[in-house]
Amino acid sequence: MEPQKEAQTPGDPVEQPRGASRSQTPKEEERREGGAAPAAAAPGAETEGASADGLWELPVEPAERRPECSRCSRPQKVCLCPFLPVHPLHISTHLYIIQHPAEENKVLRTVPLLAACLPQDKCKVKIGRRFSEERDPELSTVCRKSGTLILYPGAEAANLEEFILDSPIYPTTIIIIDGTWSQAKDIFYKNSLFRLPTQVQLKTSISSQYVIRTQPTNRCLSTLECAAVALSILEKNIYIQETLLRPLQALCSFQLQHGAQIRLSKEHLLKNGLNHVTSTSFLNEEWNLIFPLELRMLLSTCEYLSEVNKSFIGCFLQRKLIFFTYFIIRI
């Protein structure tokens, strides 16, 4: 049997029972051994414990959400309904939006604006990442129809304008995936249903007007812009594109007036050396070998700041500041 360890206290040594905590005081040990009543505890400790327990009983106030407009889903103070058509646009094409769940709660999403401009029976939004015939029989039926198109760029995709000229069956339905490019790629390639319709793409010189979000290239369009261009082609009515883009232009204008910044595309940033450390003339691959990882991480942060400031001179000065700070810390 192992000998009992002694707890060192300012007073006489007190034998510590097996399993007792080392942080116990002699009085606590005596109460544990002699069966002393818990009432011997300090009154101040009870008061503190009671007050702490009372905090858990306080009611939790739910976060208040700003009241939203029932039509455009924007907060009522920044409602965009004045920029929407008075009546939904009359179209014959059925539009299906496959929306990634992450896009559903984004503040600056464009799908609600698109849906507010079109008849409810012509524009349907399906939210999810995986779709099958068992989960969504309606979507499965739509994908199997010969007159259904899916808008997704790629080597096998046909130009929409050229396709409708040569197709014996005029398209009646178009499917558009709503999400980031990585999310859209995941949805397209991991759902076999979406490879059943004819794949088409837009070949247009239009630059995106959704300037408050970063696009991969200068020719990448938002979901609303893709739908506007595609519907105007299918319906052979340029007025549809102008009408659908009007609330998007108003949204971007409002955001820019209240502190938002114009987001240049990643393609533009790469061409101008504002995105990656290795794209500048004064920092090449050899520097990545000379300087340790923590400095390169600081430089990556500097690159992000330069994107925000949109200034090459600012990028250069920030680099100098990073180098100076790093060497001062190392010294």
Image (spheres, rainbow, N blue to C red):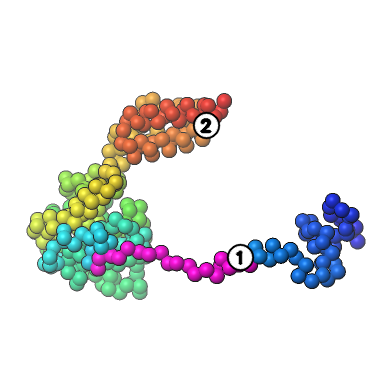
Q: What residue sits 39% from the left and 36% below the top?
A: 303
In which quadrant of the rendered view does residue 262 lie? top left
Q: What residue sits 29% from the left and 34% below the top?
A: 271
What whole-number distance in Å separates the C-alpha atoms at marks 1 and 2?
51 Å
- Find residue 214 and report its horizontal and vertical position in percent: 30, 46
Is residue 322 visible from the viewing direction of this image? yes
As for residue 221 lying within the magenta part, the answer is no
Badge 2 element: loop
Disc 2 marks a residue whose amino acid type is Pro
In which quadrant of the rendered view does residue 191 lie? bottom left
For the view shown, which residue lies furthest in the front direction?
A: 43
Q: Name the residue under label 2.
A: 292
Name the foreground residue: 303 vs 293: 303
Number of numbered tags placed on the structure image: 2
From this view, report whether residue 299 is shown above or below residue 238.
Answer: above
In which quadrant of the rendered view does residue 316 lie? top left
- Find residue 175 and report its horizontal and vertical position in percent: 24, 62
* The N terminus: image quadrant: bottom right
Q: How crowded is mark 2: few (under 14 residues within 10 Å), some or many (20 or more)?
A: few
Q: What stretch is highlighted in magenta?
A: 50-70
Disc 1 marks a residue whose amino acid type is Ser
**Residue 60 shown left or right of residue 249 in the figure:** right
Q: Mark 1 points at which residue?
A: 51
Badge 1 element: helix
Q: What residue sits 45% from the left and 30% below the top?
A: 322
**Residue 278 shown left or right of residue 72 in the figure:** right
Q: How crowded is mark 1: few (under 14 residues within 10 Å), some or many (20 or more)?
A: few
- Find residue 18 and report its horizontal and vertical position in percent: 84, 62
